[in-house]
Image: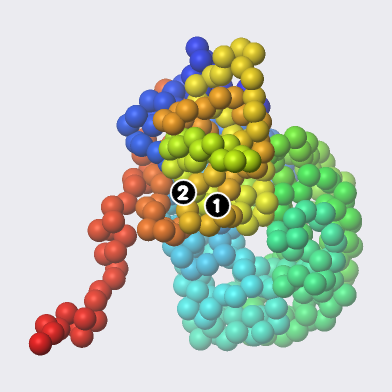
Amino acid sequence: MTGFPWFTYRDGRLYAEGVALDDIAAQVGTPAYVYSSQALTDRYQSLAEAFAGTDHLIAYAMKANASLAILRHFRDLGAGADVVSGGELQIAMKAGIAPQKIIFAGVGKTREEMALAIKSGIAQFNVESEPELHVLSDVAVSLGTKAPIAIRINPDVDAKTHKKITTGKAANKFGIAYQRAHEVYAEAAKLPGIEIVGVHVHIGSQLTDLAPYDATFARLAELVTSLRAAGHAIRRIDLGGGIGITYDEETPPDARSYANLVRKHMGKLDCEFALEPGRYLVGNAGLLLTRVTFVKQAEQKTFLILDSGMNDLIRPAMYEAYHRIVPVKSPKPGANQAPVDIVGPVCETGDTFAEDRPMPPADAGDLLAILSAGAYSSAMASTYNARPLAPEVLVSGDRFAITRRRATIDEMTALETLPAWLNEVKA
């Protein structure tokens, strides 16, 4: 069993909704990312229903997965977008997301990115520092307007997640210290190109416990009340994202429990809530379909060498992350499992998906599915070792479509040119 309702075995074959994964592999090849439309819808609606009765915007954090098809699917459900670069802003709008539903976050926005976002008419900038605040004001004034902003507050709360994805502690690079919030808001109010509209917080990613949110939202509610008392018109509270998903045996909070916590602390503040979920919406909705190239019996280990590598899914190498890995052909009942290392073809020892993982017997040519690969997989993929980006496939019921095809080597090198001296004829 996969543990996810969108990916189930039928008659010994693993399906994504109503499509057999071996049929996708036969037509598209491997490796390939496969996403379930129903999973995307279910996850989005769980949040929308949990926040029913409130004024809220679900701004999908597209850094998790910037596929145009996925963005369009969320747009059709009513979502906006949380972007962290000018490129993401343009892709979000290309997918049809209204600028009025786009929030621009990130610590290093350039003047050019700021100008693009202002001209596009986005909903809000999440300002991360005082230098950014002043530059943004200058850019807005040069365009004859004001930039709507929320200041990102760093509450110094430990999200108790992986050190590389925690963002709400004092030592992290993100946001303004909670203790300086009034000072910086007073500074923002004096700038001619700034319109204060809200407050923003985001303490990290893959949170599986509500306690850090509880502490953060309590501080945030107090801050909003005191900022309003100081004369600032706070009308939007941006809660960030970070709700975790199940990779192994985690039991992350459900959307309703999270929403109830928001209501507990901020339900009487008469504010719009902005939510910025990324992994929560797409993480469990995708898998990486891959094939065993070789089974290598080494002196101390058995290796399953796959045709997918760390360039396709870098999370295990970067974060020591766990992903469930299952055969596409259902193993026989009672099949013995033995520990294997599951690795890729990239010339790095770190190109390892799992070590000593109990698996049923596998042969060269067998298909495997690496689960929970919808977030930070294709988005962080590279062409290292001159390996083309894997295609992406979106399934809807008994239909599927290739939403990004596999590039050719000619396409991969199309942006390169040889300098003239390398084309000179040698005497």
The image quadrant where one finds the N terminus is top right
Q: Where on the picture, by quarter, is residue 151? A: bottom right
The amino acid sitting under disc 2 is Pro
Q: Where on the picture, by quarter, is residue 270? A: bottom right
> Is residue 213 toward the left or the right of residue 47 in the image?
right
* Residue located at (58% from left, 37% from top): 302
Q: Where on the picture, by quarter, is residue 400? A: top left
Badges 1 and 2: C-beta atoms under 8 Å apart? yes
The image quadrant where one finds the C terminus is bottom left
Q: Secondary structure at mark 2?
A: loop
Other-residue count near label 1 (Cα within 10 Å), few / some / many at <14 / 14–19 / ≥20: many
Q: Disc 1 and disc 2: Cα gap in Å?
A: 7 Å
In the image, residue 336 lies at what x, y percent? 64, 20
Residue most toward the front?
A: 299
The amino acid sitting under disc 1 is Asp
- Label 2, on which residue? 345
* Residue located at (69% from left, 68% from top): 150
User: Which disc is residue 38 wearing?
Assistant: none
> Is residue 131 toward the left or the right of residue 364 in the image?
right
* Residue located at (46% from left, 49% from top): 345
Above or below 264: residue 50 = above
In the image, residue 377 lies at what x, y percent? 54, 49
- Label 1, on which residue? 351
* Residue 362 in sight: yes
